[in-house]
Image (cartoon, coloured by chain):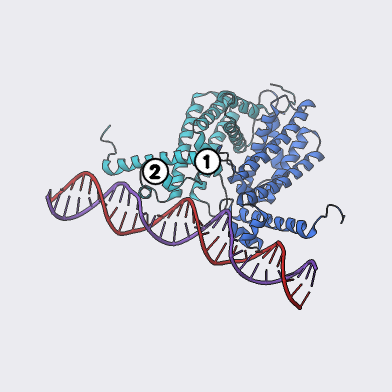
Chain colours: A cyan, B blue, C purple, D red
DNA sequence: TAAGGTGCTGACCAACCGTTCAGTCGGCTG
DNA sequence: CAGCCGACTGAACGGTTGGTCAGCACCTTA
């Protein structure tokens, strides 16, 4: 418990601690002001250090922001995986996954709003942050696609382009999250997740089977 | 043709012309650099006027950007309405609407990328641009909801929360547009629109009816 | 205690941006 | 043609920001 991978406590552990502190501070400031207006000065103040100190732990602003984005997404994915693992069947797994995402976005409302704003995909000069966000989203889509593929193999879902369907579902989820953020007094997370999955599985058409 | 509403050609017409020129220039610059990096200096240069001139036609930068956003959206809506009007049935109208949107986003790729980036919903200090974008999206959702409601009344679609379903479809469309922008060599607009409508109408579930 | 080092500080810098406004000058009017 | 008008210009300004660096305070070591 004390002798594992403890090379230089003074150097490594303290560095990790400071890094984490700054990332958390950045998270708070970004949540309050958005990515564009979160200045290094403000983040430093929030973290209780001087501006220059940040540059001892992060190469520049972009790297700091990228780490903030990665951290938040890692937590979300962990939660989604755990939820999906607990549930049974494709429908259950998808609902659990949506639940996890909706809950996470509700609890981290501020940072989530800010993240929205920075989904930029200009091909020229792709900044580090945009690339990370892109990669993160792709990871989520792949995970959902996996669930859908297994659902297809088990016969629970019909054959379809899994990746495309996954993207379809993820974007719908994004839409639901945005709507939830817009009007805080909404239905429960479970109800919203169920609605989305229902749409996703059955569609709104009425050709033959109602339910 | 020449005597209607022609109060001051020298004043009004020229003003409209200049305004249009500047909006078009802004469109180009935003497409190239994104909203955040489109400076008034650069836009002025692109429009072939001095920076100060812009302020004779627009109160400030935000108003200019808002007009750019409004202009683009107006064209899109016009196209979507026309497409839907020509088609028959809810499925046809939705497909035509998606077609129009996909085509429009393909043809105006650059500005569309940039617009993505500015979908920010911070509750505090809502800037003019964000409000306009919000309003524009709401208009599109309402239009789609109308189509869905009429489809429900005619029995082509099952009963559902039309607004929610519309939002669902619009967000999915956004996802498809993003994917198209990401990988330019994709299937045809019509095929993509059909796929989305198919998902939307029938879902991916296999409970009973395959088609 | 003196010397050396190291993490940290925050004043400073250069670059940039939106906005202003005093001045220019081509063209219209009388 | 003279004189004025106002559309247009672009240098200048105020403000902000990301990034730097000389020095300070504290701790360890000799």
Which residue is the site of mark 1?
A: A115
Instruction: Name the spot of residue B41 as percent of width and height, x first.
Output: 59, 59
Which residue in the protein does label 2 denote?
Answer: A45
Label 2 element class: helix
Asked whether disc 1 touches disc 2, contact meaning CB atoms under 8 Å apart, the reply is: no
Which residue: 38% across, 41% down? A47
Closer-to-camera residue (A148/B3): B3
Rendered view: A114 above or below C12 = above
Residue A98, image x and y in percent?
55, 29
Residue A30 is at least partly visible in this image:
yes
Asked if residue B156 lies left or right of residue B54, the reply is right
Q: Residue at x 34, y 42 (%)?
A: A18
Q: Is residue B134 above or below residue B207?
A: below
Q: Secondary structure at mark 1?
A: helix
Using the image, name the chain to which the residue with label 2 belongs.
Answer: A
Which image quarter: residue B195?
top right
Between residue B83 and residue B196, name the one nearer to us. Answer: B83
The x, y position of residue B114, in whole percent, is: 61, 49
User: Which of the 4 image quadrants contains residue A137?
Assistant: top right
Q: Is residue A109 above or below residue B100?
A: above
Do the dots labelled 1 and 2 sit on one chain?
A: yes
**Residue B38 in sight:** no
Which of discs 1 and 2 lies nearer the camera? The answer is: 2
- Quadrant for the N terminus of chain A in the image: top left
Q: Which mark is residue A10?
A: none
Q: Residue at x 66, y 33 (%)?
A: B167
Horizontal side, residue A19 vs residue A165: left or right? left
User: How crowded is the residue under tag 2: few (<14 C-alpha within 10 Å), some, or many (20+)?
Assistant: some
How crowded pointer 1 is (Cα within 10 Å; few <14, some 14-19, many 20+) is rated as many
């Amino acid at each position: 418990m004390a002798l594992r991978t403890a090379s230089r406590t003074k150097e490594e552990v303290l560095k990790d601690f400071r890094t984490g502190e700054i990332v958390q501070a950045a998270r708070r400031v970004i949540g309050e002001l958005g990515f564009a207006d979160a200045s290094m000065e403000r983040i430093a103040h929030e973290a209780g250090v001087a501006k220059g100190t940040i540059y001892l732990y992060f190469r520049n602003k972009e790297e700091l922001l990228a780490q903030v984005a990665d951290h938040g997404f890692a937590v979300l994915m962990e939660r989604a995986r755990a939820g999906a693992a607990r549930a049974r069947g494709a429908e259950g797994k998808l609902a659990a996954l949506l639940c996890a995402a909706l809950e996470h976005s509700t609890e981290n409302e501020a940072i989530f709003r800010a993240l929205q704003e920075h989904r930029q995909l200009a091909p020229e000069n792709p900044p580090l942050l945009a690339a990370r966000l892109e990669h993160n989203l792709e990871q989520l889509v792949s995970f959902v696609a996996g669930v859908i593929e297994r659902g297809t193999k088990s016969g629970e879902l019909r054959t379809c382009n899994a990746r495309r369907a996954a993207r379809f579902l993820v974007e719908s989820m994004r839409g639901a999250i945005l709507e939830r953020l817009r009007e805080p007094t909404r239905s429960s997370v479970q109800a919203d997740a169920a609605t989305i999955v229902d749409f996703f599985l059955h569609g709104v058409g009425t050709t033959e089977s109602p339910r």
